[in-house]
């Protein structure tokens, strides 16, 4: 059921049947280490390059997800996903191993939210039963794609973030699993492209915060909900500064966010790890959701969560061509 111009209240609950997450060593040493069971000890994953390692990471989480769900790829109606490499290289090359219907997505670091939203709407329409949403990112491949090769040893700026090395895959289904507590997607808000003129490619939080603000404001307005409706609200990867900026923009608009308002990029690392503003990347929100948020919901510690993955829609050439950085954010309501 469409509510307003951007929000949809789903007619049916779209169940999160299970998740699979693989993270890098640095991510496994952060505050969420007890939730990350599958850890990549070698960033190359026994591959010839970091780009190929990321492809292998996605294959690994997809295979593990099918195993956990006790399903075969023939049981999946569609595979959706994306990453940060050129032409979503990692996802496309991982998908070729599975011979399933495939929809490649790109929303930068918001791709996980885009995938959850689109998959939920397709399943709710009645023509799809099971859809896998998968995303990934890799610190080393992202650095040389968007910034500088690691071999140059360039210094990082204080407002920069650390691209998360992780892959997260989620199985969405119209069929309710037998478990007593099953998180389900109940509503989505599709974000708009927002550009406040930020030009610093090292300050992703400032570029994405206005988009998160706009999507959150729209979600609350069109669904007639206040922030207190949710037990917790997580943006995707605004980082420390971006989260504060988003909260400030909401406050100026008369929306006071609760103490439970947080960010996946902020909580995946600690300040002691010297990652400046926190984590980022297409694998950030999928890893934190699949390992941490999903686990808390399965335990009943969180019953209503709003996940708002965020993305900066630049490429390696746009800053060099003096272009500002548009942002995007999609909101997904998950409840038990």
Image (spheres, rainbow, N blue to C red):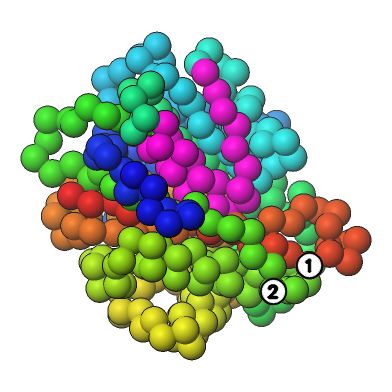
Q: Earlier in the sequence, mark 2 or mark 1?
A: 2
For residue 196, which numbered disc appears in the image? 2
Percent x, y for residue 284? 49, 54
- For the question of whether residue 166 can be seen, the reply is no
Q: Which residues are magenta?
A: 101-122
Seen in the picture, residue 253 relative to 73 is either above or below; the reply is below
Left of 232 or right of it: where is 27? Answer: right
For residue 324, which numbered disc appears in the image? 1
Residue at image coords 39%, 48%: 2
Left of 327 or right of it: where is 40? Answer: left
Residue 109 lies in the magenta stretch: yes
Percent x, y for residue 153? 78, 64
Residue at image coords 53%, 56%: 191
Contact (CB < 8 A) between labels 2 and 1? yes
Q: Quadrant of the N terminus?
A: top left
For residue 80, which numbered disc appears in the image? none
Answer few, some or many: residues within 10 Å of disc 1's Cα (few below 14, many 20 plus, some between 14 and 19). some
Seen in the picture, residue 249 relative to 303 is either above or below; the reply is below
Seen in the picture, residue 98 relative to 80 is either above or below; the reply is above
Answer few, some or many: residues within 10 Å of disc 2's Cα (few below 14, many 20 plus, some between 14 and 19). some
**In 3D space, how far apart are the residues under numbered discs 2 and 1 (Cα atoms)?**
8 Å
- For the question of whether residue 226 can be seen, the reply is yes
- Picture quarter containing residue 164? bottom right
Report helix, strand or loop for mark 1.
Answer: loop
Residue 154 lies in the magenta stretch: no
Outermost residue, right side? 321
Percent x, y for residue 143? 72, 55
Residue at image coords 44%, 44%: 117
Outermost residue, left side? 180
Percent x, y for residue 189? 44, 54
Please tell me which residue lies in front, 256 or 125: 125
């Amino acid at each position: 059921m469409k509510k307003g111009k951007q929000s949809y209240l789903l007619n049916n609950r779209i169940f999160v049947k299970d998740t699979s997450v693989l993270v890098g060593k640095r991510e496994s040493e952060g505050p969420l280490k007890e939730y990350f069971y599958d850890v990549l000890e070698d960033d190359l994953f026994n591959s010839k390059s970091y780009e190929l390692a990321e492809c292998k990471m996605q294959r690994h989480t997809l295979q593990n997800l099918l195993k956990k769900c006790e399903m075969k790829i023939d049981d999946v109606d569609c595979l959706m996903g994306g990453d940060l490499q050129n032409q979503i290289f990692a996802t496309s090359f991982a998908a070729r191993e599975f011979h399933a219907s495939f929809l490649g997505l790109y929303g930068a670091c918001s791709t996980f939210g885009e995938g959850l939203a689109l998959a939920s709407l397709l399943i709710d329409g009645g023509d799809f039963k099971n859809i896998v949403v998968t995303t990934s990112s890799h610190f080393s491949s992202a650095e040389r794609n968007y910034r500088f090769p690691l071999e140059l040893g360039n210094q990082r700026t204080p407002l920069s973030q650390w691209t998360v090395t992780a892959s997260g895959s989620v199985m969405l289904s119209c069929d309710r699993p037998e478990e007593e507590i099953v998180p389900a997607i109940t509503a989505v808000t599709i974000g708009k492209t927002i550009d406040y003129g930020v030009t610093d490619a090292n300050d992703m939080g400032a570029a994405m915060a206005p988009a998160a603000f706009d999507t959150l404001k729209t979600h609350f307005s069109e669904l007639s909900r206040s922030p207190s409706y949710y037990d917790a609200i997580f943006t995707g990867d605004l980082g420390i500064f971006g989260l504060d900026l988003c909260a400030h923009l909401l406050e100026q608009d008369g929306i006071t966010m609760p103490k439970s308002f947080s960010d996946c990029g902020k909580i995946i690392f600690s300040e002691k790890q010297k990652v400046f503003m926190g984590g980022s990347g297409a694998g950030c929100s999928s890893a934190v959701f699949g390992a941490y948020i999903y686990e808390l919901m399965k335990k009943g510690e969180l019953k209503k969560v709003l996940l708002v993955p965020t993305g900066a829609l630049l490429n390696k050439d746009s800053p060099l061509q003096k272009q500002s950085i548009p942002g995007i954010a999609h909101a997904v309501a998950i409840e038990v």
